[in-house]
Image (tube, rainbow, N blue to C red):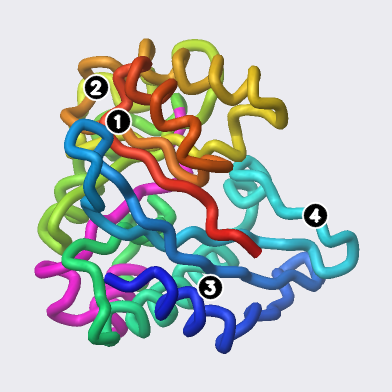
Amino acid sequence: MSANVLANMIACRGPFPFEDRGGRNLWLDFAVETVTSLRHETAAAARVARAVVDATTGAALTAADIGRMSDEDRLHIDQETFVFSKTIIATPEAPTALIIPTSFHTVASRKGRREMVSVLGETLKTGVILELMDVDRGTPLSRLSEVGSLATTLGRGVLVRLNPGRDMAAAVRGYRPHGVTMDAGDLGATDTDLASGMLDFGEQAKGCAPTLMVFGLPSEDFFAVASVGGITHASTRRAA
């Protein structure tokens, strides 16, 4: 996969404006990150990174903000993500595995699954790993297991995004996904906060899944800290 070719293609597509059900003007921004195996020091996959931005203030919505949006708004975000992902998969430089963030609620609904299949088609099973968002301690284990099984039938694998905080692994306790993930943007603004957050994530998530992944690091300088913390894979943010 050529990171430069993918980055140039992204730049040509630009942001995707939309209005949510509350009347806010928002826009979606996408990038592609290379996910590195820290053990082998090689590219293992690519990941679609997305940001939902308030067009009025320029501030990016947090994962908690997006989690409070309506099912319809989350589905719209996922639909745009699927379309964008399809353009990545269709390129000659397409990665062998593409991690796509998707709301838990989208996968849980028949409408959401139909939309996913209609856009991504057969590439789901051959090249897509689904990263389930909006999973928290309030998600019933039986429902998580059910939706996780559905996601497994659709794609190559299932990851679950964890939210930082005390007992963060409680969200997946009793369910074993292929991997658990964390976004560096949720771990703090300073280098110290980021390093501490990664170590905490690695400690709490140990044994939850075969792979522990941190996405969107400021630079590869943090890979060593991630590795020490037991994290198996990491990616860096694409420069603006």
* Tag 2–tag 1 contact (CB < 8 Å): yes
Classify the position of the N terminus by image quarter: bottom left
Label located before the other in sequence (4 or 1): 4
- Image quadrant in which you'd find residue 209: top left
C-alpha span from label 3 to label 2: 30 Å
Label located before the other in sequence (2 or 4): 4
Instruction: Measuring from the top left, give residue 67's x and y in whole percent.
Output: 58, 47
C-alpha span from label 4 to label 1: 28 Å
- CA neighbours of label 3 inside 10 A, class few (<14), some (14 to 19), many (20+): some
Q: Which residue is mark 1?
A: 212
Nearer the observer: mark 3 or 1; the answer is 1
Per the rendering, the mark at residue 59 is 4
C-alpha span from label 2 to label 4: 33 Å
The residue segment tinted magenta is: 112-136
Q: Which residue is mark 3?
A: 76
* Tag 4–tag 1 contact (CB < 8 Å): no
Nearer the observer: mark 2 or 1; the answer is 1
Name the residue type under label 4. Answer: Ala
Label located before the other in sequence (3 or 4): 4
In the figure, is residue 231 to the left or right of 19?
left
Q: Is residue 185 magenta?
A: no
Label 1: which secondary element: strand
Q: Is residue 132 magenta?
A: yes
- CA neighbours of label 1 inside 10 A, class few (<14), some (14 to 19), many (20+): many
